[in-house]
Amino acid sequence: MLEVHAELLDRLELGKVADYIPQLATVPLQKYGIAVVTREGELVTAGDAAEDFSIQSISKLFTLSLALGRFGDRLWDRVDREPSGNAFNSIVQLEHENGRPRNPFVNAGAIAVTDAILSGHLPKEAIGEILSYMRFLASDDSIVIDPLVARSEQLTGHRNFALAHFMKSYGVIDHDPAMVLGVYFHQCAIAMNCIQLARSGLFLACDGCSPLTGDRVVSTSRARRINSLMMMCGHYDGAGDFAFRVGLPGKSGVGGGILAIVPGKASIAVWSPGLDINGNSLVGTATLELLAKRMSWSVFH
Amino acid sequence: MLEVHAELLDRLELGKVADYIPQLATVPLQKYGIAVVTREGELVTAGDAAEDFSIQSISKLFTLSLALGRFGDRLWDRVDREPSGNAFNSIVQLEHENGRPRNPFVNAGAIAVTDAILSGHLPKEAIGEILSYMRFLASDDSIVIDPLVARSEQLTGHRNFALAHFMKSYGVIDHDPAMVLGVYFHQCAIAMNCIQLARSGLFLACDGCSPLTGDRVVSTSRARRINSLMMMCGHYDGAGDFAFRVGLPGKSGVGGGILAIVPGKASIAVWSPGLDINGNSLVGTATLELLAKRMSWSVFH
Amino acid sequence: MLEVHAELLDRLELGKVADYIPQLATVPLQKYGIAVVTREGELVTAGDAAEDFSIQSISKLFTLSLALGRFGDRLWDRVDREPSGNAFNSIVQLEHENGRPRNPFVNAGAIAVTDAILSGHLPKEAIGEILSYMRFLASDDSIVIDPLVARSEQLTGHRNFALAHFMKSYGVIDHDPAMVLGVYFHQCAIAMNCIQLARSGLFLACDGCSPLTGDRVVSTSRARRINSLMMMCGHYDGAGDFAFRVGLPGKSGVGGGILAIVPGKASIAVWSPGLDINGNSLVGTATLELLAKRMSWSVFH
Amino acid sequence: MLEVHAELLDRLELGKVADYIPQLATVPLQKYGIAVVTREGELVTAGDAAEDFSIQSISKLFTLSLALGRFGDRLWDRVDREPSGNAFNSIVQLEHENGRPRNPFVNAGAIAVTDAILSGHLPKEAIGEILSYMRFLASDDSIVIDPLVARSEQLTGHRNFALAHFMKSYGVIDHDPAMVLGVYFHQCAIAMNCIQLARSGLFLACDGCSPLTGDRVVSTSRARRINSLMMMCGHYDGAGDFAFRVGLPGKSGVGGGILAIVPGKASIAVWSPGLDINGNSLVGTATLELLAKRMSWSVFH
């Protein structure tokens, strides 16, 4: 893995840091970390694996898991499960499909999931519940939310406000858009490092049960289904390319992180802030491609 | 497997036979066959597994494999690899994306692949090459093309003519649209039964090498990639749902057939002509869902 | 004109009152008024011509005129002048065209115009300026804003919030979306009767100069251009049909009002709350069609 | 008018000759003609007003008039009357609207009109009928079709083939797409000069009756309606801009011609092959804008 890290170092400048969230625009392109946690609990790291970054849309994976735990398959009444064929923040499909989001990993869908989590809670409580869930999954109580990032998103998140109000006009979300986005911007602003992230995803590699703590997080069948959603929709309009090149379920965030799952074997977190044209980490994807090839990890055998 | 077959028999009437190709509209809804071939060469069948049906879009999987063999990764210059988020015969994305098809499994993309296969050939030769390839994969020289179906498609395939001319206007296909479609309609009209189809797909379950004959059909890495394309795009705008419910790569056809791959283990062909709203076999999908659950077959572990 | 009014009375039930603004949903379908003011100042009325209704999108015509007065042709930097081919509240084109609205009469475009009017003003001042302008045009200081309608729109206007935030994300509007919409909802809630409305539009029939007061409102060339925009875009995706049937520039509102201009001759206001499928007054359009035919009024000779 | 011609001469190089029809790509950018025929029969010309050019889409105006004469308002069963908000050759709206073209002046709509004209005729007869109609309108039997242009369009018109096959798949056109396009390409290839064209349009300026011959071509009401369609849809996605700047109904062609109508007064034909971004003659539009301003010609008073 150190080899992979070394091999790709000179490509770090090729990506472009997300600039529409001012707080993220300041992160240096040179940051690059990898962490792998195996089913047996073995941890291997490289580079900046212990440095915090903003998990952003990777949080959508965990709020989905959390909401499925509370609402079960009723959650699918408000969000579909199909790849979108559009950008992560596109509003076109919402208009063509009566405000119903395509899947829980495009922004609209994730906002609808957060709206579900907010049911019966104050925004502060919902934020607290999401943070607790992350600490539980990572077995690490030091995980926090970066308030500057949350505030930066709040101030500049007009596209997300548009999505939320649009869904609200169709009755797809229940709460006030500002309240839902208050929670959503905080979940996106959770700061984690590669090690914590890889640990958090391990239950998906282990049929729903985390070998770190022995806790069952979701059923085997739900773990499979969450993996399938990551594979189909985890990289927006680059999902096909990611599946083709890497062959593993994965979820990316505009902070430059990607969490990938090797079902039955391992959980991998990579971080490199330079993004490709679809908003996915450029070197992060290359890392997973190379690592999967070297390790012969692929769900397609 | 016989149990699965018996359990789903009463749902056969729920689907709708494809009616836009007159010749297919005459197939009885009661037809229902299953065939599984394992890596070890074991064959299990149920129902009408030995009766021929029109493979239709399942042929796109094999022409892709054939074209990749001839052109390698240059093929991706003319067709993309992303889920479309649209119907199999949609032309909207072609206009938005300069005539470049989204993936090789929507009609436009498959026509572009067939156009590549036509290079250096007369239409008759290209049709012959495709048929030979199918006979080789299935190790069965009795496979033929149904001329009535081919003719029926020719007469009513205006939507496909629209797609081909549209791509031609962007220079995405090289040959005369009528010539390309002449080949395309014949590949769709190949008649096979479940047993032949399951045998033909076995190389994709076995890292590119067919255990029936010992022949290497494609490299391990290409077999994985073809599987990833089947998973991402094999069921049009129902791909997400198929991945969620079945968890295996699969390719459907409007004749009611589906070929699904259990990487490392088996190849499955099902046939039931009643289609769901996305044009995929309704009972075929249910069969694969139940079978995968009972056998605990899933690429997501 | 009384004949036209009588002839169409039995069609009043065919339309559908706008129901997405609760306050408008309570207006009886039986309301029906007509007022014509000629260039010479003659007034003819029929039915409920003296009863107030919510002018809604007809206000867009006057805010456009007001904004052109302040910003001149620089206004066209932020909004285009083409028919949209879409519904009045569609957001699809905004995404395809980088947040730039198609014309000042779709909701997005009108919000962008209101944003311009807000420059250098507090929302209250902008609302006051718009109201003063209406009173000036109608020569009638009794015109007011209906606060219940304004509030009703504020509470249910999620679609407009979506449009405003979407444009804000592209930098197309300068102010806070909530502030802009605060003004916008008030301009839509202006209550006027047919007589006041017909008087307000008379300057457009008279080369920019109101014969009621002798005031020049806009230049001759600007009056022509505003008329052209009404003709091309004044009835959303029913503009072609309105031009075909009526042959006059007109602007409709979901309150059931339509203002139509007979260049060189007269200004006509009709009100009937039942709407057709495009959100334009059904009997209002029929009234104008019949009236134009009887009077042989058409810009096309 | 000679002044207008002289003033705009130096802008001729700014446009771009249509290059997707090879035969049109050879026409020099320097060509520039104007012809005005008044209601009283007076003719004024400037520049290359007597030189033939390919009328292209201006033919759509005359086939519409011809088809309305044969089928009356039943023609509207197959084509709508709304501006499209899209390019002249867009296929997107056809898919969203079940194959029904937006208006008779986008390519799809004009092809549907030609399909109607073909009813009961052989293609040759239909072509003959259209040509006769042009000769009758212009009172000039020397008008012919340029066979090289017709052939050039036939060979490169894949986009039009796509539109025709697409409509055929929805049953919107009755005849074989190749037959319909055979006629359509010939109507587009009619060669006329500005003088002939201005004379042909004069009936639309004179309530349906040509003062040149005294013949009634269409009823007064139909003349108005055709003018309204020209205004709303005659310049594709530049219709709003044309109405704003020129204020007259007009129909453009990619050969660089524009026919504009001054209702009650005159018919104007301009020709300059350089096109703007929407496919309308750049200097032709500027000519009409300047001429309309100088003469104070506008339907908006």
Image (cartoon, coloured by chain):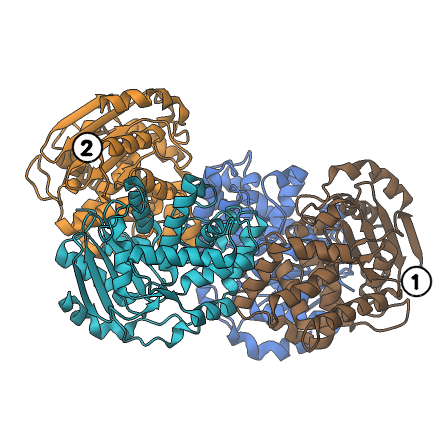
Chain colours: A brown, B blue, C cyan, D orange
**Relative image position of residue B291 (x, y in whole percent):** 69, 71
In the picture, measured across the screen, residue B169 lies left or right of residue D52, that is right
- Please identify the residue farthest to the left as the structure is shown: D214
- Where, quadrant-wise, is the N terminus of chain C in this rendering? bottom left
Label 2, label 1: how many angstroms apart (C-alpha)? 85 Å
Work out whether disc 2 and disc 1 sit on a shared chain. Answer: no
Instruction: Report the residue at 60% width, 55% height from top.
Output: A159
In the image, what residue type sits under mark 1?
Glu
The image shows residue B246, relative to residue D188, as above or below, that is below
The image shows residue C290, relative to residue D255, as above or below, that is below
In the picture, measured across the screen, residue A84 lies left or right of residue D6, that is right
Q: Quadrant of residue B242?
A: bottom right
- Element marked by disc 2: helix
Query: Number of numbered discs present?
Result: 2
From the image, tell me which residue sits under label 1.
Answer: A40
| Local crowd size for mark 1, using a 10 Å CA cut-off: few (<14), some (14–19), many (≥20) | few
In the picture, measured across the screen, residue A80 lies left or right of residue C215, that is right
Instruction: Report the residue at 48% width, 56% height from top.
Output: C125
Confirm whether residue D250 shows in the render.
yes
**Relative image position of residue D255 (x, y in whole percent):** 32, 30
**Relative image position of residue B56 (x, y in whole percent):** 53, 56
- Element marked by disc 1: loop
Query: Which of label 2 and label 1 is nearer to you?
Result: 2
The image's mark for residue D198 is 2
Q: Chain of mark 1?
A: A
In the image, what residue type sits under mark 2?
Ala
